[in-house]
Every structure is written in structure tokens, then in C-alpha cells.
């Protein structure tokens, strides 16, 4: 696993870096190769915050925890990520089983009444016109609506972007990556 340690307005000691490498080594059993981890350390007022993001095969696992010590925050992040991996692993296994047994499932569905499985997503579909605007205008619109995020068309690039409110009270902007053809 490739590990990047980022320190924002703090100094990360070598023993903490070694702890990060030791704790993240447990994920090698889930991701044999090709995983990238970014660990960000920062101080928020009197608390110490750790943000852990693991990227593997286009899937992101992310956790952010705040506590009195970096070590405690890191341990909590590791626990959260491990839970996300287990949850995702189970869903992937279910999908694989359903893909391989598609013919059997079709026969069973025809014979039995439809049964709702645990873990299905209840997805509400909503459509609306995307208006060209700047990220600042989108943030104002998001705040007026009282939402946590807002999708819009960037007036400069024409891309579909999303602004969102972060836990720390700041804002984030998601911009799509251009694929190289």
C-alpha cells in the first residue's frame, strides 16, 4: 500500500508515522496491491483530527475522526475504514453470487413471491435543470435551500459540479476529472 502522510499546521513525529504504517499494514490482506492511502493530520482548536482516505480500484474509503490525541483519532479512523471495507466486501460478494447464479435466480423468482433482501437501497429519483453558475453562486443557492450539497453546471467549464458543506463548516467543490482518450 502506498501511504502519503500530510501534516497541516502540525509536525508529525517519526513514531506516529511508524504507527500509521503499522496500523495500515492490516489492510494489505484486503488490498494485495494497488491501494493508495492518504493520512492527513491537523489540529482544530484544542483537538487533533486525522483524516484517512484509501483509494483502490476507483473505490474510496474515507474516515475523519477528532479527539484529544492523534493516536486515538487514528485508531478510530482505522476502525471506521475496516467497517466500511467489511460492509463493501459483503455487498460485492452478494453481487458476484447473484451474477453467477442469474439463471437460478430467475427460476426461483418466477416460482416464489418477491422477497426484499436486507441492504437494498431505497433510491429517490429527482430531476432538475442544471443552471450555469459559479461555485460561489451555487453555495448561496445551497444555503438558501438548506441542503448539504448542490449540483450545478460550472459557468466557465460547462462541467457538472457539486458543492457541499463540510463538517468543519467550510465548503467543498467536486469537479469531474477529464478522461484521457
Image (tube, rainbow, N blue to C red):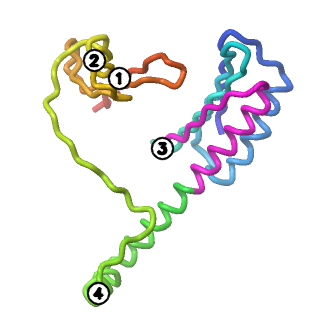
Disc 2: which residue: 138
Q: Earlier along the polypeptide chain: callout 2 or callout 4? A: 4
The answer to whether residue 33 is above or below residue 171 is below
**Residue behind mark 4:** 107
Q: Does 92 sit left or right of 8 as displayed?
A: left
Separation of residues labelled 3 and 2 (CA atoms): 27 Å
Question: In this figure, which residue is indicated by the disc labeled 3?
Answer: 59
Rendering quarter of residue 106: bottom left
For residue 163, the mark is 1
Between 100 and 76, which is closer to the camera in this rendering?
76
Say what secondary structure mark 2 lies in.
helix
Is 97 rendered above or below residue 171? below
Instruction: Look at the picture and state if 7 lies above or below 109.
Output: above
Secondary structure under tag 1 reads strand
Q: At x 48% / y 16%, what residue is drawn?
A: 170
The span shown in magenta is 60-86
Q: Position of residue 82 (x, y in %)?
A: 65, 49
Earlier residue among tags 1 and 2: 2
Q: Is residue 65 magenta?
A: yes
Around disc 1, counting alpha carbons within 10 Å, would you say few (fewer than 14), some (14 to 19), or many (20 or more)? many
Q: Residues within 10 Å of mark 2 (few under 14, many from 20)?
A: many
Check disc 3 and report its element: helix, strand or loop.
Answer: strand
Closer to the chain start, of discs 3 and 1, is 3
| Of 12 and 181, the residue lying toward us | 12
Q: Position of residue 174 (x, y in %)?
A: 37, 25
Residue at the (79%, 31%) spot, across then down: 71
User: Disc 2 and disc 4: Cα gap in Å?
Assistant: 49 Å
Whether residues under marks 1 and 2 lie with C-beta atoms below 8 angstroms apart, the answer is: yes
Amino acid at each position: 500500500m502506498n501511504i502519503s502522510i500530510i501534516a497541516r499546521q502540525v509536525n508529525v513525529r517519526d513514531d506516529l508515522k511508524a504507527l500509521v504504517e503499522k496500523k495500515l499494514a492490516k489492510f494489505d490482506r484486503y488490498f494485495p496491491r494497488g491501494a493508495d492511502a492518504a493520512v492527513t493530520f491537523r489540529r482544530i482548536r484544542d483537538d487533533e483530527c486525522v483524516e484517512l482516505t484509501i483509494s483502490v480500484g476507483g473505490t474510496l474509503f474515507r474516515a475523519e475522526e477528532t479527539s484529544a490525541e492523534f493516536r486515538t483519532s487514528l485508531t478510530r479512523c482505522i476502525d471506521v475504514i475496516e467497517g466500511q471495507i467489511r460492509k463493501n466486501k459483503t455487498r460485492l460478494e452478494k453481487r458476484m453470487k447473484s451474477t453467477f447464479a442469474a439463471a437460478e435466480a430467475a427460476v426461483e423468482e418466477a416460482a416464489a413471491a418477491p422477497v426484499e433482501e436486507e441492504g437494498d437501497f431505497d433510491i429517490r429519483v429527482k430531476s432538475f435543470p442544471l443552471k450555469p453558475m459559479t461555485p460561489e453562486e451555487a453555495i448561496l443557492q445551497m444555503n438558501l435551500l438548506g441542503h448539504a450539497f448542490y449540483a450545478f453546471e460550472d459557468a466557465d467549464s460547462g462541467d457538472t459540479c457539486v458543492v457541499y458543506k463540510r463538517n468543519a463548516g467550510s465548503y467543498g467543490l467536486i469537479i469531474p476529472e477529464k478522461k484521457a482518450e
